[in-house]
Structures are given as structure tokens and as C-alpha cells.
Amino acid sequence: MDPIRNPYAPGAGQRPPELAGRDEQLAAFEVVLERVAKGRPERSLVLTGLRGVGKTVLLNALRGAAVRKGWGTGKLEARPGQGLRRPLSSALHQAVRELGHGDEESVDHVLGVIKSFAHRDAGTAAKLKDQWSPGIDAPAVRGRADSGDIEIDLVELFTDLGGLAADVGKGVGIFIDEMQDLGADDVSALCAACHELSQSGLPVIVVGAGLPHLPAVLSASKSYSERLFRYQRIDRLAREAADRALEAPAADEDAAFEDDALAAMYDATGGYPYFIQAYGKAVWDLAPRSPITAADVAVAAPEAQSELAVGFFGSRYERATPGERDYLMAMADVAAERPSDDEDSVPSADVAARLGKKPQSLSPARDSLLKKGLVYSGERGRIAFTVPHFGRYLRERG
């Protein structure tokens, strides 16, 4: 089949041609946008799930919905060891520009507050040449969002931002990817700011996306975070949605799948959106003609697996040290011995027993893997892969 017309798009955060299985989340968010813009109380939103389930794609789709409503939006990706001030300042600068507020003085005031918030990143004693600014021409507003206490500053910043949005009957959406990588102080400040927003009714919401343990990270910061956010677990697609993710793009290119081929694709991908795109691309390129058959899927499977082994699994495996790889392999072996799949957690004590070591001696390797985002701990004493099918990859790799 013509590779130029191949509709499938495996890529990090790349929107697939058919965003299947997320209609419920998109419809619910439309309601949130309308309620917040009208001053109705609504909780901010947190999306959680394994890597490859489409959290970033959905986050971008939600942001697109906000933009279509005339909202101001800004997006940032949290990174380990990076403070919140700089990326958030850039995101909010963009949000203010998107709002299109007509009063230049009011806009300059909020931009000045953002600038003062950003300047505190370098500390009060920093030299002017060391100060970072998100490209804002307005002068910094002294005495607002510049106390140095991130919790106080974030509340003041969001309050001024919400007032600007309320003036024009719109809202501001702050979209944070990899939210679990925020520092502890930044998480606490973000929760406090969202709490203040929920009490004041200002039209600002935070939409975060992260790994399955993100709710635990938020709860450890502020006990009331369980009531601050609406948590939505983003998981693999059901069979019907997975079929639609394959069939709809194919139909747009005058192609089709046989029923047996769709069944084979679901067995191979497990319904994970990233895998669906990877297998879809490989099958399309190798199938001689439409309709695509189960035999075509069997022929293309090694190509898809090879692509995933390099671009999805291998790139993550290479980030681990030899000792960390031993830990990952032990996790895979323990998971294989249990009546569950690789997406379930395993007791860390069993991993240590598999390696013939005491759990305490493996803490450095485990902690390093947690920081690298290769594993997560959703509950005390248990550990799981952040990447679906990673255990299978490790066992097949040997």
C-alpha cells in the first residue's frame, strides 16, 4: 500500500488521525469550560496513566477546546530539578496574550506581576544581568508575587490573572505535563493556589497530566488535594475504540481492515494508543493491498516490534545503569511469575529476594529509577513499570 498515504502517526505527544475513546473526557471538559467562565465552582483536572496511553495527546486536545472557547491558555512540561517559576511565567505570558483583554493598563499590570514572579527565580540578591524574564516589556510590579515564598506568590499571581480573565468573561487554563516531576514546594504551592481559586470562584483552572502515582504526590503535599482535583485515569482503549482508531483513518484513505486483522491488532497492541499507531504504520507499509488481513498483521508484527524496541522501550532502557537494569529485569521476572500482567505492581521485597539482596541495599537503584521515570510506586512496598509491556520487552531481550 502507498506509504505516502499512510495515516498512522506514532510519536511522543503526536495527535493520532482519530482520537478514539476519549469522547467522554472531551465532553466533560466542555462543561467545565462553560461553568468556570460563568463563575460556577469547578475542580481542576488531573489525568493519570502509564506512558503510551495518550495523556499528552489528550492534554493538548483539552487545551485546544479551551482555545476554541476564547480562553487564555499556557502549557508547560515539568522536569526533575527545575523550578516552577520560569516555565510557568512563560506559559502565563502566552495565556494573557491569548485572552485579548482590551485594557492595556490592566494587561500591563498582570504582565508586570508575571515578570516579578519570574524574577524571584534567581533570588532577591541576584544581579540584574542574572535575572531571567519571559520576554515581557511591561515593568515588574513590586510587592506582588515577589515575596520569595512560592505559595504566597502563586496565590497572588493566579488571583490577578483570574481577575483579568473575569473582566472579559473568559477563563485561563494552565496545562502541566509530567506533573509528577514538580518539586515538593511547587506542588504544595500549586495545591494552595488551586484551593484559593476554588474559594474565590475566579476563572482559572489547572489541568495536569502525569504517571499513575501523581494523586499520591499531590496528597502527600496537601491533604485536601483529593477534593481539589477531579482525577481521571487514562487507560488502554476498549476494543471498539481501538478498532475505530484503525478503521477511521484507513477509510479516509479508501482502505479497510478485515475483522480478523482488527482482532489480531488488538491482541498485539493491548489497546495502547501508541502501540496502535506503531502497528498501524508498519502494517500499512507492508500490506500489499486493501483490505488488510490477519496475515498482513503477522508479517508486519516483527517490524512494529523492532520499531518499538528502539524508539519506545530501548531509549528508556539505555538510560538505566547496569545495576538499575538488573533491578528492572528482576521486576520483569517477578511479574511473570504472578497471575497478572506487567502493568500491575509487584512487591519490592520480592524483587530484592529475586536478586538475593536486602531491600535496603537496593534503595539507591530503586530511587534512581523512580527519578528517571522508569518505575513508579503507587503504594508503599510495591513497584511497577511506567511503560506498558516493558517487562515483556525485558524478558524477550534477555
Image (tube, helix red, strand yellow):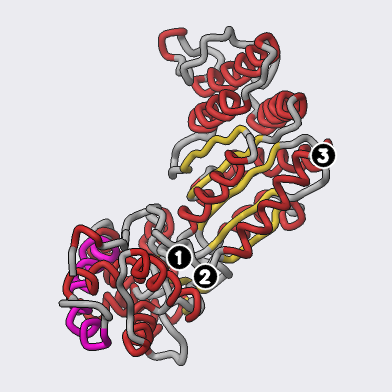
Q: Indicate the quadrant where residue 186 lies.
A: top right
Tell which circle, 1 or 2, labels the residue nearer the N-terminal end: 1
Residue type at tag 1: Val
Q: Which residue is mark 1?
A: 53
Q: Residue furthest front?
A: 254
Where is mark 3, residue-wise? 39
Label 3 vs 2, first from the N-terminus: 3
Can you say whether 68 is above or below 276 in the image?
Answer: above
Residue nearer the viewer, 214 or 173: 173
- Spot occupied by residue 223 in the image (x, y as percentages of width and height): 74, 54
Question: Which quadrant holds residue 262?
Answer: bottom left
Q: CA distance from mark 3 to mark 2?
A: 31 Å
Label 1 neighbourhood size at 10 Å, few (<14), some (14-19), many (20+)?
A: many
How far across and down, in percent of the image, does residue 294 sit?
A: 27, 87
Q: Which residue is mark 2?
A: 235
Magenta highlight on residue 239: no
Residue type, numbered disc 2 = Asp
Q: Bounds of the magenta span?
A: 293-314
Label 1 with label 2: CB-CB less than 8 Å: yes
